[in-house]
Amino acid sequence: MSHKIQTLSGYIHEYQKSVLQPEVFWGRVAESFHWEKRWDKTLEWNFEEPDIKWFVNGKLNITENILDRHLFIMGDKPAIIWEPNEPGDEAVTLTYRELYEKTNEFANAMKAKGVGKGDRVIIYMPMVPEAAIAMLACARIGAVHSIVFAGFSSSSLADRVNDCEAKMILTSDGNFRGAKKIPVKAVVDEALESCTTVESVIVFQRTGTEVTMKEGRDYWWHDVIKGQSKECKAEIMDSEDMLFILYTSGSTGKPKGVVHTVGGYMVYTYYSFVNVFQYSIGDVYWCTADVGWITGHSYIVYGPLLAGATTLMFEGVPTYPDAGRFWQIVEKHKVNQFYTAPTAIRALQAYGLEPIEPYDLSSLKVIGSVGEPINEEAWHWYHDHIGKGNCPLVDTWWQTETGGIMVSALAGVIPNKPAHASLPLPGIQPIIVDAEGNELKGNNVEGNLCIKFPWPSMLRTTYGDHERCRQTYFSTYKGLYFTGDGAKRDHDGYLRILGRVDDVINVSGHRMGTAEVENAINEHPKVIESAVVGYPHDVKGQGIYAFAICDMEGRSEENLIAEIKKTVANIIGPIARPDKVQIVPGLPKTRSGKIMRRILRKVAAGEADQLGDTSTLLNPEVVESIIESAKNAK
Ligand code: 7RM
């Protein structure tokens, strides 16, 4: 672990090196890995096309660095600890050797079904170790995984399957979440009615739920691994070959497939994991995310396992069987680093201190936050009552597109400051710009957050549509990667992330495009037009507020609102269900016909008295009736 920074002066020194000589800096980190062939050149890039290549012509397989490399001295050390949904059920530990064997066995099974290098595989699975095994098995044979969060609907799943033309789906019969048993395979079946590329589906048996298995297409996980060798030669990959695609919402209606490649992603997730969490061999690390999100990819699976860590996976939810579950697990497995989302903290905060009291949390050394800005109140609660005032709290800012943590304190190395993500990691060069793209230098400035130099784990493209990648991230400000977030650099030079400046809302740390939700609402036959905005929500950070113009004939407002919510849950998934729907006679439009969301945001936030100038509207009269009918929103 020679790359672990241990002091503030060490950080300052490393940061400086990483900016003055980025190629030397990252070359040194990359050297600690096993490469089949060393790279010729560390970096080639331009942000115009964009075209970014790290470790050019290097050849490797990421799983050799996760599995084979760790067999020698870590073979019997726990790689994954799995805590099941039911507290009474036994936890499962997989050592590095067991993970190696299970990955290879399943990789061979996938190969036997005709999947190989470059083929896309959709993973639609609950939080079981097999989800990690599935990811690694894909990486072993060079297949590109694309995980779809198992809470997404069949049509969301079908869209992703079709966009990446997946050849295989890995799924489960069902999924336990708290007191609920959720069908999973049935959702896949429904999705597959509108997909043509999928040749086989492998089903992991988790709940025993009855499922239909289509002859010649669907196979049980436990059947396909029978007789497979526990050795599988790793496919040699180019550093810039795809590792995975992960779909994420943006400001347009259609989620984009963010593409990450093997070499750079490996180097950066490892480096950032070790430094942010100050992981030491033997520690038990737990990130509560789902593998369906980027946090699960980078900081449950790849980063920790590359570092030889013990990573805990939890199948259930924070409030089952009660609001003490997280803390019970921390005590049970003596968790040393705990990484969760502000929305979970706020939800648990509402239960008070009683659920925490029975548990010994003294194993904790570092606590972390990710997914959205953490408000000061939640920060203090988390810091005082979970960290007991003596664990550094790392507020980590990053994105699906960045692949790894970009701005964060390094635990115990960089001093904390509530609600501030703080400082960039070595190798990361963030800048704040004004609307014209001028860099705002110095402290006490606020503007849009951009990154001006490439880092190893940045996205390379959006799958099947490179122009969209250029447009979305590299065209707003010439020569810069634009994050979509606003940020402030305070008087100490610490960064505070202010949230999205585009049409993306962050609901419980999950990104939703307003356009995506609007498209779903518009599917309801009685909806004529809709507009969706975010509004402050106590637990979720932001809630989804929808304004809809509807044909009311034969419907009560209440029924219609309920139907609209249901439509969205069906089309996208329950996480996109609007918190509030308001039926309106019209929407405020500019003269060019654009919806003026600024006004709707104020109404949704209950700040209709601060609307500002509405005189430029095409239809100013509609505003009064929107304000008036806000009380009927449900
Ligand atoms: C890791 C992840 C990305 C968006 C991002 C921000 C917001 C994430 C923080 C944060 C303030 C943080 N990827 N965000 N972390 N805002 N402080 N520590 O969440 O692609 O799903 O979302 O999330 O707006 O642009 S993501």
Image: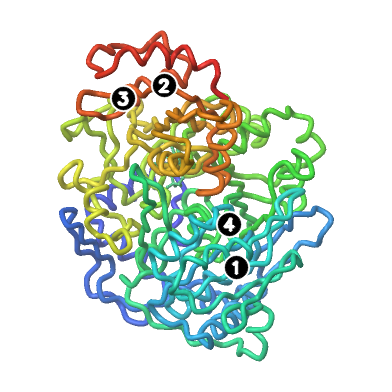
Residue lying at the far top in this picture: please name it: 609
Which label's residue is closer to the chain start, 3 or 4?
Answer: 4
Q: Work out how far the residue at label 2 is from the one at label 4, CA to CA, in angstroms.
A: 37 Å
Mark 3 Cβ inside 8 Å of ligand 1:
no
Q: Is residue 429 above or below residue 434?
A: below
Q: Dividing the image into 4 quarters, which one contains the C terminus?
A: top right
Q: Amino acid at mark 1?
A: Thr
On the image, numbered disc 4 is attached to which residue?
150
| Between 18 and 247, the one nearer to me in the picture | 247
- The kind of secondary structure element at disc 1 is strand
- Name the residue located 20 percent from the left edge and 57 percent from the top edge: 50
- Residue 212 place in picture, x, y as percent: 67, 72
Q: Work out how far the residue at label 4 is from the one at label 1, CA to CA, in angstroms.
A: 9 Å
Q: Work out how far the residue at label 2 is from the one at label 3, CA to CA, in angstroms.
A: 15 Å
- The kind of secondary structure element at disc 3 is loop
On the image, numbered disc 3 is attached to which residue?
596
- Residue 213 place in picture, x, y as percent: 65, 76
- Residue 296 place in picture, x, y as percent: 53, 55
Residue lying at the far right in this picture: please name it: 88
